[in-house]
Amino acid sequence: MISIIITAYKEPETIGKAIESFLKQKIKPKYELIVSCPDKETTKVVKNFMKKNKQIKHFKDPGQGKMLALNILFKKTKGDILILTDGDVFVSENSVKAIIEAFQNKEIGCISGRPVSTNPKDNMLGYWSHLLTDAGAHQTRQKKAKQKKYFTCSGYLFAFRNKIVKEFPRDIPEDAYIPFLFMKKGYKLGYVPEAKVYVKYPTTFKEWLEQKRRIAKAYINYQQIKIDNEPLPLMKSFSKEALEGPIKAIRYPKSYKEMFWTITLFKARLYMWLMTYYDTKIRRKKHTDAWKVVKTTKKS
C-alpha cells in the first residue's frame, strides 16, 4: 500500500490541482491520499473531493507547522511507502509509477523527485527559479545519486519506506534529515527525475528573500545536529555555494541579459546569507516550525 501525504495551509486555489494530479494517474497498488491542512478554506475544497473519491482523507493538523503535522501523520499512515508533497504544487503524469518502480530496488530507502519551475523565464525572478532548479538542484542530485553519496531530497516531492522514521526534529529541514537517517541505516538514496513536481516560485523579491532566509535558517539549525556523534552532511551553506555554485551557474545563461541576471543572483544570495547570519548570530532569531504563507505561490 502507498500513503500519499499532501501538506497544505491556506491553499484553496491550488490544492485541487495538487489532488487531481494524483487522481489522474493509474496507480496500481492500493493507496490512500491524505491531505493535511488546518484552515477552513482548504478543508472545504478537500471535502468536496472526498465525496467522489473514497481514497482521499482529510487530517486537520494542529496548525503549528508542517513538521508537527508530518510527525503526527507518520504514526497514522498505513502504507509501506510514503510519498510527501505540498498543496501549492502538482506532480507529473506517471510520477507515482516512476517512484514505485525505483523502490523495486530493495537497497533504496529514500527517493527524490525533480522540481520544475512553472515561472516564466523571461523575467529575473523566473529565470532565477529555473537556474536554481536546473543547474543547481537537478544536476547536483543526479551527480550525487550516481556516486551513491548523500544528497538532500526535494521537499516538494520525495518518498521513503515507512516505519523507518518515526519522528524528526521540527526546526530542521525534513528533506535533509530523513535521507541521512536512511543512509545511516544502510539504505541508498535514489533520484528519479522522471517524477517531476511543478512548482510556482515567488514572483516578488521580498517573498523570494523571505523564503530563502527561512530555508537557510533551517539549515543553520541542521548544522547543530549530530547522530551517534556524527555531524550531518551539508548540502546547503554559504561556503558550499561560494565554492561550487558560481561554476555551475555561469554556464547556464544563454544571453547577455541572462548573464546579468545570473550575476545579480550571486549578489542576492550573498545578501540573503548575510541577513540570515545577522538574524541567527546577532539577533539570536532562529528558525522554528510554523506555517508561513508565500502569497504569490498560492494562486493557481
Image (spheres, helix red, strand yellow):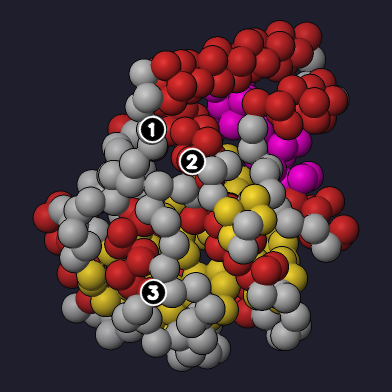
| Residue under numbered circle 2 | 221
Residue furthest left as drawn: 40
- Measure how far apart labels 3 and 1 are at the Cα level: 26 Å
| Residue under numbered circle 1 | 286
**Secondary structure that dominates the magenta span:** helix
Would residue 55 be counted in the magenta stretch?
Answer: no
- Choose the circle earlier in sequence order: 3 or 1: 3
- Choose the circle earlier in sequence order: 1 or 2: 2
In which quadrant of the rendered view does residue 130 lie? top right
Look at the image and give the residue range highlighted in magenta: 119-140
- Choose the circle earlier in sequence order: 3 or 2: 3
Nearer the observer: mark 3 or 2; the answer is 2
- Measure how far apart labels 3 and 2 are at the Cα level: 22 Å
Between 187 and 121, the one lying in front of the other is 187
In which quadrant of the rendered view does residue 132 lie? top right
* Amino acid under disc 3: Phe
Between 52 and 156, the one lying in front of the other is 156
Identified at 28% across, 85% down, the residue is 54
Nearer the observer: mark 3 or 1; the answer is 1
Residue 270 located left or right of residue 102: left
Residue 191 percent across, percent down from the top left: 72, 62
Quadrant of the rendering where the C terminus is positioned: top left
* Amino acid under disc 1: Lys
Identified at 12% across, 55% down, the residue is 40
Note whether 84 is above or below 257 in the view shown: below
| Residue under numbered circle 3 | 74
Residue 287 percent across, percent down from the top left: 38, 37
Mark 1 Cα shell of 10 Å, populated few (<14), some (14-19), many (≥20): some
